[in-house]
Amino acid sequence: MYVATTRSVQISVTPIYLEDQSAPADNHYVWAYRVLIENLGSDTVQLLSRYWRITDSTGSVEEVRGPGVVGEQPVLSPGHSFEYTSGTPLTTPSGIMEGSYQMATEDGDTFEAEIPAFSLDSPFQPASVH
């Protein structure tokens, strides 16, 4: 699990390689990732939008921006959380994802909550010995 906290919003990510949806012979590798967003602070916050930077093992970068997550813009009162699962395909057996959520407080103050960088590793990624 990968964890980052910004202004009392804690984001935890757990990536899962989906072997049954991947086809390594066709350079198609798929991961799910489970995200838990927890409001550890005393202010109610709302997730407005998302930004993802997805880098495969060749260094190719895809950036994704959009409103909310999985069709929602959850409001988190103090002590509450929101969890969702999404996924991403790559044409390489490994990569890295990172990003941020634009959050807003009830008084309209916005900030970027860091999504921790996390590794997408498949069993088909060659290991190197140092």
Image: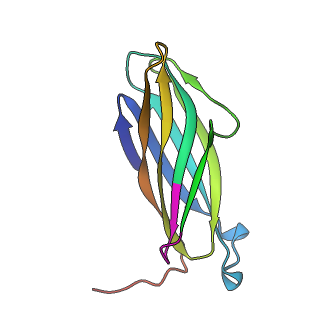
- Give the residue at the far top of this rendering: 107
Percent coordinates x, y for residue 67 in the rendering: 63, 37
Q: Nearer the viewer, residue 76 or 66?
A: 66
Q: Closer to the camera, 40 or 90? A: 90
Q: Is residue 102 left or right of residue 90?
A: left
Q: Position of residue 91 (x, y in %)?
A: 62, 75
Vertical relation: 22 (above or below) 113: below
Residue 11 rendering spot, x and y as whole percentages: 44, 39
Q: Is residue 67 above or below residue 21?
A: above
Q: Give me the residue at 50% from left, 78% from top.
A: 58
Q: Which residues are magenta?
A: 53-60
The quadrant the C terminus occupies is bottom left
Residue 69, horizontal then vertical, whole percent:
63, 39
Asked whether residue 113 is in view, the answer is: yes
Quadrant assignment, res 111: top left
Q: Is residue 58 left or right of residue 20?
A: left
Q: Which residue is situated farthest in the left direction here?
A: 130
